[in-house]
Amino acid sequence: MTILDSRRRWLALIVLCLGDLMIVLDTTIVNVALPTIRADLGFSETSLVWVVNAYVLTFGGFMLLGGRLGDIFGHRRLFLIGLAAFTLASLACGLATSQGMLVAARAAQGIGGAIVSAVALSLIMNLFTENTERVKAMGLFGFVMAGGGTVGVLLGGILTDALDWHAIFLVNIPIGIAVFVLCLVLLPRGAGQASGRLDVAGALAITGALMLAVYGVVNESTVSLIGAGVLFVAFVVIERSVSQPLVPLGLFRSRNLATANVIGVLWSAGMFAWFFLSALYLQVVLGYDPLEVGLAFLPANLIMAAFSLGLSARLVLRFGIKVPLATGLGIAAVGLLLFAFAPVNGDFVLHVLPGMVLLGIGGGMAFNPVLLAAMSDVEPKDAGLASGVVNTAFMMGGALGLAILASLAASRSESLVASGVDAIAATNGGYQIAFVAGAVIAALAALLAATLLRPGKSSAGQGEPVAIHA
């Protein structure tokens, strides 16, 4: 391989990460602008939630379909299509003058984001086939995924304060155009590796099931959850009967892939709870403004950057994927538990910073290994599908975990208010019980990683790379 080819691959990786960063940012950047959006477009308190939910519903629902389309029609082609759709939808969001227009554009953003996220990991795995380079590349990708949400809060506060809420969407336009052009130049052309037709029935069943599941949890709709269960059973029946299924069920015979997806569901549930609930604690209980909330997350973000860009890769090369993943999840569980002791009159240095530091360390250590574990035993022709599966696990775990833990926090707060506790103390009491539950979930994920995950072949003490099979 020439030096030029090597440089081109690393430049392609940076561009792919920049494209995926837009997707990650948009899951959090909107949160700090919600009050402004509500006042400007006249949303009610209940209808405002659809600015977030419309994105989550389509993002989670179309992830698997996007991954499989990439396998069939080509990862490069689908990445460009998804990127174009996301960029155009961002323009529509930024120009929205009505509630309906904004919600519809957010749903379109979710579809584009699902496609980009589903195939980006496949493109990276195909660009970097040598073990040591792949670990380093995944470290950079992990940094973008782990730190992007925190950057989104900070950037959202800055743009909303300096300009207005339209800017949080319009900022995607120049980035999206630049990434699209650079991808045309840097990404190698390639046809889809999977043969045959798309399993339309299976795609409709699983997409509908995932969207109904997210809708049911977010809106506490029993009917939707039952419908999701029925469609999921139908999906399994379809996949067992068709000759060319959307998701070959035999894929889950890979212990690492199956285990990594369960871990992904649990970990994202705990991390989503930390991110949103700690932001609420800082705003509602401690009285921070949006920009101060973003700055409060900087320690965790910087630590994740250090681990994801170098330290995590070295740990994987030294110990394999199992030890760093289990250890990182355990450290994150302790960080969540520390937040459960944050009082009403909490001090940043004493009650916020320690948890932020531990969650930064734990998240930085764990993100790279869990992605590598999910992809380690997958054939190249199924890389897009496996990427879609693990991304779906993260998205669904985060949505389900956040909805459940937020409901737990609200129930606890209501109980405390009924017993005579003042509103702020009751709200904080709800956050505390949710943090405890999040810590338990993260600890369970660490236990699964330690007991079920098959370790990579680490050459401890010899400096040889871990064996990762594509």
Image (cartoon, grey):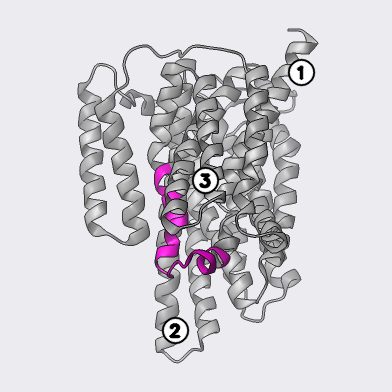
Q: Which is in the foreground here, disc 1 or disc 3?
A: 3
Q: What amino acid is labelled 3 in the image?
A: Ala
According to the picture, the residue beneath numbered tag 1 turns out to be 7
Q: Residue at x 22, y 28 (%)?
A: 238
Residue 82: % across, % down: 50, 31
The local secondary structure at tag 1 comes to helix
Q: Residue at x 24, y 28 (%)?
A: 201
State left or right for residue 66 relative to residue 293.
left
Numbered mark located on residue 92 in the image: 3
Q: What amino acid is labelled 1 in the image?
A: Arg
- Looking at the image, tell me whether mark 2 or mark 1 is earlier in sequence order: 1
Q: Nearer the viewer, residue 176 or 59?
A: 176
| Residue 95 visible somewhere in the drawing | yes
Q: Which residues are magenta?
A: 36-58
Q: Residue at x 57, y 53 (%)?
A: 28
Q: Nearer the viewer, residue 236 or 263?
A: 236
Q: Which is in the foreground here, disc 3 or disc 2?
A: 3
State left or right for residue 415 relative to residue 339.
left
Residue 21: % across, % down: 63, 40
The local secondary structure at tag 3 comes to helix
Q: Nearer the viewer, residue 67 or 312?
A: 67
Q: CA distance from mark 3 to mark 2?
A: 43 Å
Q: Which is in the foreground here, disc 2 or disc 1?
A: 1
- From what the image shows, is residue 236 above or below residue 216? above
Identify the image quadrant of the N terminus.
top right
- Label 1 crowd bin: few (<14), some (14–19), many (20+), radius 10 Å: few
According to the picture, the residue beneath numbered tag 2 turns out to be 416
- From what the image shows, is residue 86 above or below residue 244? below
- From what the image shows, is residue 193 above or below residue 352? above
Q: What amino acid is labelled 2 in the image?
A: Leu
State left or right for residue 413 relative to residue 221.
right
